Image (cartoon, rainbow, N blue to C red):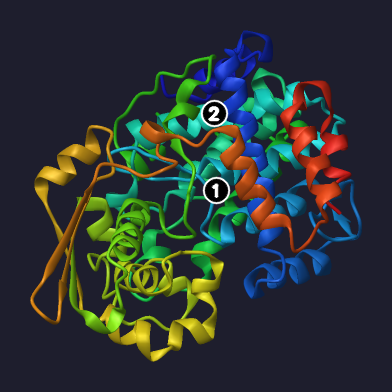
Amino acid sequence: MATTGAIADFVQAVEYDEFDDDVVEELKKRVLDSVGIGIGALGEAPVEIVAETVSDVSDGGSCTLWGRSGSASPSQAAMHNTALTRYLDYMDSFLAPGETPHPSDNIASVIACGERVDASGQDLIEAVGVAYELQGELAWNAPVRDKGWDHVTHTVLSAAAGSGSILDLDREQLRHAVGIAGTAHNALRVTRTGGINEWKGIASANAARNGVYSCLLAENGMEGPTNLFEGQKGWKHIVSGEFDVDLSAGCERVFDTMTKRYVAETYAQSAVEGIIELAEEHDLDHEQVESIHLDTFHGAKLIIGGGEGDRHEVETKAQADHSLPYMLAAALIDREMTNDAYDPERIQRDDVQSLLRTVTVEEDPELTERFESGEMPANLTITLTDGTTLETRKDDFQGHPNNSMDWEQVEAKFHTMARDRYDQQRREEIVDTVRNLESNTVADLVALLD
């Protein structure tokens, strides 16, 4: 049942000791992946704007700002650290037919609140499970994208639930926190339509901050609308329409979450993998390529294939990582898709700017049906200047729930992302701390993230 009371009851029913071992393993992977991505984003201009702003409005605090010497309040630390995990567009994604949110957007909030109350690693795993389960259920049962709302409209609710869990709010405090979060902080889809701007990569940090702040208000006695969902002019009426959720205390929704192999928008992963495989198999020279055509599913066409604005005009990172034409062109030329693909000089180079204009993207209803049945299909055709055609058909990619990354692969990704900031010894300490999180504390983890 979708009520603030049902969510509060769910949060209080979740117990680490009741989690299956596989759930614990997956949640640990999400923590390590998010920390690595976050550390890798340090120095990016929009992240530095957030850091400067957090510094301006903070006068110290109990929570660590990852990668920096300063600290801040839980809500400001959530803003800063979530901006890190989200900005590069290398975070995880939950795959539902009508919505694709990023549950890792919740992790920094939970860590910040856990640091505030000196929480254990088991508490952290439990609260991350809460956030993943709620975000997944909302994405599956209450998609808001087609109604004009951004997916971080879900994130503020899941961040409040996860943060409330680790803060150990009581039932009424949880109801008030969720009510405040869901009433006051609904985000518009315009962030990701038309000409993409840098707020795209920061919007979830704002939602995370607001989720934490809602919990702190409720903890201090603030009342919120506990009829958030079903009340007159409430969330169901204005935001989502009618829906229900089936929240499981086992928090198995984490299994429906993918880990990104490439620094690219979620729906591009299979296509990028496919075009790199073709380029390597046939040793392609981009100057031999006449055109690139992709048949894809509805969400990919809509978001990154031109359904919400032309994706052939690419001048910035925010535009590039939401442009299938750019990502396919860059991946074919470079035979990889790392953060280097979004360097301003690389985006502006003639080779990729010329090739991306040959890319066409079409929706195939059959592929949409397959996506809604749990795949991430991509059918690619490359036509060469001599008339030769090369094709590949992908069902999913390495990191998709049907083809998930194991611990060693996630660890390798972490080392790649964090090696410019931390030496081998520090990285191994972080990996070991997360790998054995149930025997460590939140303080043990954040002490390694200065």
> Residue 167 location, x and y as percent?
76, 29
Residue at the image position 69 percent from the left and 45 percent from the top:
108
Q: Which secondary structure, mark 2? A: loop
Number of marks in picture: 2
Q: Position of residue 169 (x, y in %)?
A: 73, 24
Q: Quadrant of residue 437?
A: top right
Q: Image quadrant for the N terminus?
A: top left
Q: Would you place residue 197 above or below residue 258 in this image?
A: below
What residue type is disc 2 on? Thr
Tag 1: amino acid: Ala
Does dot 1 land on a helix, a strand or a loop?
A: helix
Q: Does any portion of residue 228 appear in the rendered image?
A: no
Q: Earlier in the sequence, mark 1 or mark 2?
A: 1
Tell me residue 330's x, y (percent): 39, 73
Residue 184: image tag: 1
- Quarter where residue 313 is shown: bottom left
**Image side of residue 83 versus residue 258, left or right:** right
Quarter holding the C terminus? bottom right
Q: Which residue is mark 2?
A: 226
Whether 391 is drawn above or below 401: the answer is below
| Contact flag, marks 1 and 2 (Cβ < 8 Å) | no
Above or below for 437 versus 395:
above
